[in-house]
Amino acid sequence: MSSLQERIEALKTQALASLPKLSDESALNDFRVSILGKKGQLTEILKGMKDLSNEERPIIGALANDFRDKITDLIEEKKQELESSKLNAELAHETLDVTLPGNMHHKGTRHILTQTEEEIEEIFLGMGYEIVDGYEVETDHYNFERMNLPKDHPARDMQDTFYITEDTLLRTHTSPMQARSMDAHDFSKGGLRMIAPGRVYRRDTDDATHSHQFHQIEGLVVDKNITMADLKGTLDLVMKKMFGQDRKLRWRPSYFPFTEPSVEVDISCFKCGGAGCNVCKHTGWIEILGAGMVHPNVLEMSGLDSKVYSGFAFGMGQERIAMLRYGINDIRGFYQGDLRFLKQFA
Ligand code: FA5
């Protein structure tokens, strides 16, 4: 046997013994370079080929080629084996439990007063009303004078408020939107039907049912031949939609300078159904809104002929409606931002 053949056989024995012991890809790469690289052991051995006889050269060449092919295949196999065991180790380490709860994102909810307002708006939109926005900072002119409350009118005392200047104030009710809507409306194209929700202010002492700032929804319909029957039919329908078909309404004569006749509307108590309890102060009824037929002076101040046009108007307290619907016994809960209160209405 030639010495080259012996060296190849020895290299083969040694390589086959070392290969299984390699435990990572960089060791495997070093191993490959040490045998097959430019300065590798097989390359070195083959340099001796030039000294062989013509008979020996093809035999040794075939032997070397065999060894190179075999060791190349084995290195490739080992490489794949190392890669897959590395991947398996990573997978075992990074086990993902898809049944674990995810990261919950807290989702807020609309305020109960907003929800109440939207429900009422929905009902009126269904009846063809438009929704208008008003100004919380209002003029004395629109808040009082155009509502038939001239300066020094004693009924102004019922709605004292915060003044910014002598003629500019925080509005005490949403009623100024009656005058502003009539001013803006083109009556040659037909009647006016609107509601105006919004925040109002009064110099009231805060207690369980009163706040110095609260919300109202104004309603106004002005057209030819509007009568009190229209007002009664409209409010009957809206209140039954809000509070249920078995609720009864009671109409009491009242006084507002901007309506004539004026009424206050009570609803049969949601808690006792009319028998009398602590919620309705043992009367069976709870006051819910003020309303009436638009005073001729208010129509005339908007340039309308009160012999041709008539209308009805109403103003309801949003907090009052929400309190009645959900049995809330303190108005201050709406404004304190206590999540324990607010989350009940999510
Ligand atoms: C008015 O404000 C009239 N503008 C309503 C009106 C409009 C009558 C159109 C006729 C025609 P009143 O002051 O009664 O009326 O208030 C109406 C509603 O607002 C009350 O029924 C009540 O629900 C609510 N409200 C009044 N004052 C307070 C207060 N301090 N805190 C909370 N809600 C209040």
Image (cartoon, rainbow, N blue to C red):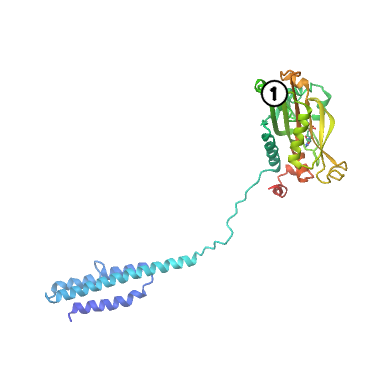
Q: Position of residue 20 (x, y in %)?
A: 35, 75
For the residue marked with disc 1, what is the amino acid? Met
The residue that disc 1 covers is 182
SS at mark 1? Answer: helix
**Can residue 337 be seen by looking at this rendering?**
yes
204 sits to left or right of 34? right
**Can residue 161 be seen by looking at this rendering?**
no
Task: Give the answer, above or below, for where 66 lies relative to 266.
Answer: below
Identify which residue is drawn at 18% across, 71% down: 47
Front-lying residue, 233 or 251: 233
Task: Give the answer, above or below, for where 169 lies relative to 327.
Answer: above
> From the Cβ of disc 1, is ligand 1 less than 8 Å away?
no
Task: Give the answer, above or below, for where 305 lies relative to 7.
Answer: above
Identify which residue is drawn at 85% across, 32% down: 252
Q: Position of residue 172 (x, y in %)?
A: 75, 30
Front-lying residue, 333 or 42: 333
Q: Position of residue 210 (x, y in %)?
A: 79, 38
Q: Residue furthest left?
A: 54
Front-lying residue, 288 or 170: 288
46 sits to left or right of 224? left
Q: Position of residue 178 (x, y in %)?
A: 72, 26
Image quadrant where one finds the N terminus:
bottom left
Name the quadrant where ligand 1 sits.
Answer: top right
**Alpha-carbon neighbours of circle 1 within 10 Å: few (<14), some, or many (≥20)?**
many
The image shows a total of numbered marks equal to: 1
